[in-house]
Structure formats: structure tokens, C-alpha cells
């Protein structure tokens, strides 16, 4: 059995290595858990490995807010110290503090 440990935590602000967006981690899959159609839509030379954590992000760019699904290899910690303005953040997290968002609920 492959043991995978996520590099980023729930509530952490991250940014994409190649694309101009950042977001807050709200869920983590230990390995790829999306559709094959979604995976095949990524150009082959940019396709991430499936055997790594994939992160669900409340994401933002300069023009919109959305949910992103991103492999660990394509993320970096966001060191800006700036909050993310996604409108769904208050549903899951408390106020931005010390570079991250605390969870509103207890995990099992």
C-alpha cells in the first residue's frame, strides 16, 4: 500500500506554479480522484502523475472565483500574506490569521 502524506494543509493558501491563480485548500485526495475525461483534457506534456495528493481549492484569479482541482506538483505555498476573497470561504473557515484560515468545524 502506498502511503501518501499531503504537503499542504486545510486552510492553507497556495498558488499554482504555471497559472495565475491562488486558493485555499478545503479538501485533499491522497491520489487522483476525478474523471478520466477531466484528466485526458490536460495536454499530455502537462499531465500530472496520478499517484500524488490532489487538492480542492477555493480559487481566485483577477477576474473570477471558482473551485480548482490541482496536483501537489503544481502548487506552491502562497507567501504574499494576503487573504483570498472567494465568497465561500466563510462557510468553511474562520477569519484569515497568520497566513491561513482556521476550520469552522472539527474533523473526525
Image (tube, helix red, strand yellow):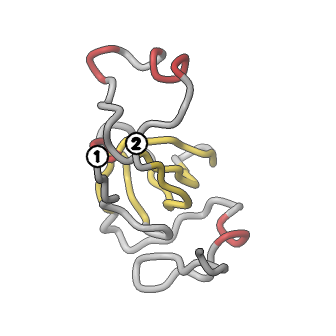
Q: Which residue is mark 2?
A: 31
Tell me where residue 43 appears, x and y as whole percent.
37, 15
Q: Secondary structure at mark 1?
A: loop
Residue drawn at the location 54% of the way across and 32% of the way down: 34
Disc 2 crowd rating (10 Å Cα; few below 14, some 14-19, many 20+) is some
- N-terminal label among 1 and 2: 1
Instruction: Determine the image quadrant of residue 79.
Output: bottom left
Depth check, front residue: 62 or 40: 40
Q: Position of 73 compared to 65: left or right? A: left
Depth check, front residue: 85 or 24: 24
Q: Which residue is mark 1?
A: 2
Q: Secondary structure at mark 2?
A: loop
Q: Position of 53 compared to 86: left or right? A: left
Disc 1 crowd rating (10 Å Cα; few below 14, some 14-19, many 20+) is few
Q: Quadrant of the C terminus?
A: bottom right
Residue drawn at the location 45% of the way across and 53% of the way down: 22
Amino acid at each position: 500500500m502506498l502511503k501518501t502524506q499531503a504537503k499542504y494543509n486545510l486552510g492553507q493558501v497556495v498558488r499554482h506554479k504555471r497559472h495565475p491563480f491562488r486558493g485555499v485548500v478545503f479538501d485533499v485526495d491522497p491520489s487522483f480522484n476525478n474523471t478520466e475525461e477531466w484528466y485526458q483534457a490536460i495536454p499530455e506534456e502537462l499531465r500530472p502523475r496520478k499517484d500524488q495528493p490532489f487538492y480542492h481549492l477555493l480559487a481566485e484569479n483577477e477576474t473570477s472565483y471558482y473551485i480548482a482541482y490541482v496536483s501537489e506538483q503544481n502548487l506552491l505555498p502562497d507567501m504574499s500574506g494576503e487573504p483570498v476573497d472567494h465568497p465561500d470561504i466563510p462557510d468553511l473557515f474562520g477569519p484569515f490569521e497568520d497566513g491561513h484560515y482556521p476550520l469552522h468545524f472539527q474533523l473526525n
